[in-house]
């Protein structure tokens, strides 16, 4: 019997999962609904979706899995409709980065036998189906939060589906998931946003801060370019856990202030040393909420055609570039040309090719 998978929403994550299913399971049929018809048309034209729906109706009742890929609160709004049309064996899952609210809604609606929460720990500061990719969730942890009433065999089968898409399934309770993501994902986004807003507030009319902002500042605030709508939903949905980690972080900021205020050199050193040691111990994975970036920096001469020579060398060696740009401020940056790649193998190959041509390459870990 043909496996049928439904999607409600085809943004960055939903589109990437759908593309991964099409890549690894071309025999599966994908049924989809989105509130933006143009997105559905693109997905159909790309061969990702076979059945396009203008509403959530009986056609979803044939699905073996249904992925809810809209914002957290919107996902919850579809549950009641789905409850009345799905078959008993269907597994409804979601991709939201907050699990508490939807698990509570599932329990209230008596749908625990059919719900397994999901959260692929992958993403980008860019949004929408146009930026989705079949490799986005590859090698990324995919957190699974089963309902208490779901059959363990369904959980095992769902783990196998996730694993078949190249992800790394990790089963947690939904409360543990929400606390962990509040610390490693939600708090960093809030910090990045407040840092950017702080510089905007401190900057003068000449905007000199904006002009010279580079290096470490741009690295740690990259995620501030993420979707405001999505992060509004997340902050409202995971309020309790986020407040808990913000309070803890506030205490740590106050401790740091005291160290600077008292000119405690040893304490300041220990603060930076302990953070460096813990950061260096983090697993080297390409997935995650703050996805690893593959970037090298290259010294080039200020002459006509310098950049073109480098890009031609990379193209001749079939190396795809994600982004390239000139660094105007070298504070905490080595080199002058910043080149970003989609994958680690392209990054390593480019390093080798340019080094062989006697370019001076700098890498940051």
Image (cartoon, rainbow, N blue to C red):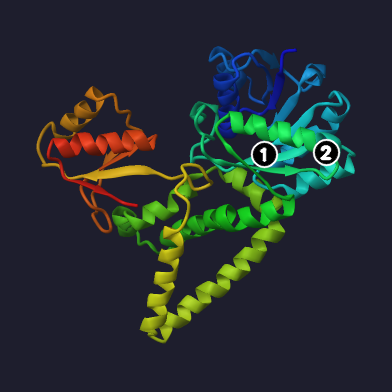
Q: Residues within 10 Å of mark 1 (few under 14, many from 20)?
A: many
On the question of residue 175 being in view, the answer is yes
Q: Does residue 317 lie above or below 122 as drawn?
A: above
Residue 316, quarter of picture = top left
Which quarter shows the N terminus? top right
Residue 112, quarter of picture = top right
Q: Position of residue 31 (x, y in %)?
A: 69, 18
- Give the labeled residue for mark 2: 150
Taking 324 as reference, is 257 left or right?
right
Taking 285 as reference, is 248 left or right?
right
Q: Nearer the viewer, residue 221 or 298?
A: 298
Q: Position of residue 318 (x, y in %)?
A: 28, 24
Q: Secondary structure at mark 1?
A: loop
Taking 283 as reference, is 353 left or right?
left
On the question of residue 69 being in view, the answer is no
Residue 169, quarter of picture = top right
Q: Residue furthest bottom?
A: 262
Q: Position of residue 130 (x, y in %)?
A: 50, 26
Nearest to the eye among marks 1 and 2: give it. 2
Q: Nearer the viewer, residue 64 or 259?
A: 64
Please tell me which residue is depicted at 75% across the width and 38% down the height of the picture.
Answer: 116
Please tell me which residue is depicted at 28% across the width and 44% down the height of the picture.
Answer: 296
Q: Earlier in the sequence, mark 1 or mark 2?
A: 1
Q: Residues within 10 Å of mark 2 (few under 14, many from 20)?
A: some
Q: Which mark is residue 241?
A: none
Q: Nearer the viewer, residue 158 or 225?
A: 158
Q: Secondary structure at mark 2?
A: loop
Q: Does residue 274 lie above or below 35 as drawn?
A: below
- Give the labeled residue for mark 1: 71
Q: Position of residue 158 (x, y in %)?
A: 70, 33
CA gap between label 1 and label 2 equals 23 Å
Circles 1 and 2 in contact, beta carbons < 8 Å: no
């Amino acid at each position: 019997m043909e496996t049928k998978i439904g999607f409600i929403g085809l943004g960055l994550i939903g589109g990437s999962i759908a593309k991964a299913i099409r890549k690894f399971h071309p025999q599966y049929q994908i049924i989809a609904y989105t509130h933006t018809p143009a997105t559905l048309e693109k997905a159909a034209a790309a061969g990702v979706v076979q059945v396009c729906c203008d509403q959530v109706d009986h056609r979803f009742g044939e699905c073996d899995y249904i992925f809810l890929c809209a914002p957290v609160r919107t996902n919850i709004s579809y549950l009641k409709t789905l409850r009345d049309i799905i078959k008993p064996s269907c597994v409804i899952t979601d991709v939201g980065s907050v699990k508490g609210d939807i698990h509570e809604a599932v329990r209230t609606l008596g749908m625990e036998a059919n719900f397994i929460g999901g959260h692929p720990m992958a993403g980008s500061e860019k949004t929408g189906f146009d930026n989705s990719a079949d490799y986005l969730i590859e090698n990324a942890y995919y957190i699974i939060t089963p309902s208490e009433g779901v059959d363990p065999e369904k959980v095992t089968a769902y783990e196998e589906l996730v694993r078949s898409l190249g992800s790394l399934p990790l089963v947690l309770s939904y409360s543990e998931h929400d606390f962990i993501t509040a610390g490693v994902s939600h708090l960093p986004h809030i910090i990045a946003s407040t840092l950017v807003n702080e510089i905007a507030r401190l900057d003068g009319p000449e905007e000199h801060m904006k002009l010279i902002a580079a290096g470490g500042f741009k690295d740690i605030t990259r995620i501030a370019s993420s979707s405001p709508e999505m992060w509004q939903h997340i902050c409202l949905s995971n309020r309790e856990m986020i407040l808990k980690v913000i309070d803890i972080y506030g205490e740590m900021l106050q401790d740091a202030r005291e160290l600077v205020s008292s000119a405690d050199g040893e304490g300041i050193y220990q603060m930076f040393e302990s953070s460096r040691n813990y950061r260096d111990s983090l697993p080297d994975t390409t997935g995650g909420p703050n996805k690893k970036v593959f970037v090298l920096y290259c010294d080039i001469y200020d002459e006509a055609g310098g950049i073109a020579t480098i890009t031609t060398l990379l193209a001749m060696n079939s190396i795809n570039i994600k982004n390239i740009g000139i660094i105007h401020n070298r504070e905490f940056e080595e080199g002058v040309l910043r080149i970003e790649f989609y994958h680690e193998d392209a990054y390593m190959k480019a390093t080798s090719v340019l080094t062989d041509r006697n370019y001076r390459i700098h890498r940051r870990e």
